[in-house]
Image (cartoon, rainbow, N blue to C red):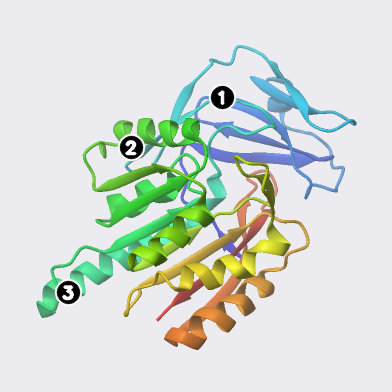
Amino acid sequence: MWIADNWKDYEVLDTSNGEKLERWGDYILIRPDPQVLWNTPRESALWRKKNGHYHRSTKGGGEWEFFKLPEEWSIHYKDLKFHLKPFSFKHTGLFPEQAVNWDWFSSIIKMHYKNSAKHASSNQPIKVLNLFAYTGGATLSAAAAGAHVTHVDASKGMVGWAKENAASSGLANAPIRWLVDDCVKFVEREIRRGNTYDAIIMDPPSYGRGPKGEVWKMEDCIFSLIELTAQLLSKHPLFYLINSYTTGLQPAVLQYMIETVIVTQFGGNAQSSEIGLPVSSNGLILPCGASGRWTP
């Protein structure tokens, strides 16, 4: 499992009976987690000192209960700063487990620039495409490492939120192209335009609807999207990353799809794994989805 264990401002404190106890900077939240099937003693006093508790409804969805929680606050990951706010369906605007992927591709980008400078082989910037880019965690990590990033998300609000995170992280003037667009349609247009990218990051939802009611279902659409995005890779791509939060979609499935499409065209190596967060109370690693990675 790939573990996001470099956080200072975020921590999973404990897990029990379908919920996780988290520290987001100075604030304690309790949120539901479908992976937490165990019912263990809630020994930490922080279970009773929470600032926010998301209660899931038996009818679907749920609602927040707040205890001295501000409408918005911020946390840091290394040199990046993220604004947080609780909103519908338990989210805060950040998926902390993705930090393990941020570190992975940031090191690849930095190493590429280091090697290029050493051999004077190329002064061209690395172009990264981030699809379903949400509030910009991956975008900012890639930009901070020196890449030129195209950030695409269908939600205008999320793109605005990502821009705020960029400004707070000192990246307001970084070479980031911010686009509110349907990701699949954008990729199709980029193919027609003949544009290419040196790396692609994707974090597609398990289920969603487009602006005209188009249904996106991960299991039905993901392979064709991988095939499409492969057409946007440059002649010598640097990396490819796809994430999944779809229950039942095993990491090996992501790896096989990448091998079938990307490795067949470009060679290199595909890897996959669950990603997770350490639980400070007991040493458990909480599973938080899966990632598939490719490098040349």
* Other-residue count near label 1 (Cα within 10 Å), few / some / many at <14 / 14–19 / ≥20: some
- Mark drawn on residue 289: none
The mark that comes first in sequence, 2 or 1, is 1
The mark that comes first in sequence, 1 or 3, is 1
Left or right for 109, reference 277 = left
Q: Classify 67 as above or below 40.
A: above
Mark 2, mark 1: which one is toward the viewer? 2
Q: Which x, y percent locates residue 264?
A: 51, 87
Residue 168 vs residue 44, the one in the foreground:
168
**Of the residues shown, which amino acid type is indicated by label 2?**
Ala
Q: Secondary structure at mark 3?
A: helix
Could you tell me which residue is drawn at 38 percent across and 34 percent down?
165
Q: Residue furthest right?
A: 58
Could you tell me which residue is drawn at 33 percent across and 74 percent down?
234
**Of the residues shown, which amino acid type is indicated by label 1?**
Tyr
Q: Quadrant of the C terminus?
A: bottom left
Residue 78 can be seen, yes or no? no
* Other-residue count near label 2 (Cα within 10 Å), few / some / many at <14 / 14–19 / ≥20: many
Residue 154 vs residue 245, the one in the foreground:
154
Q: CA distance from mark 2 to mark 3?
A: 27 Å
Residue bearing mark 1: 27
Could you tell me which residue is drawn at 24 percent across and 48 percent down?
175
Whether the residues at callouts 1 and 3 have beta carbons within 8 Å, the answer is no
Q: Quadrant of residue 291?
A: bottom right
Residue bearing mark 2: 166
Q: Which x, y percent locates residue 142?
A: 34, 54
Residue 45 vs residue 141, the one in the foreground:
141
Q: Residue furthest top?
A: 68
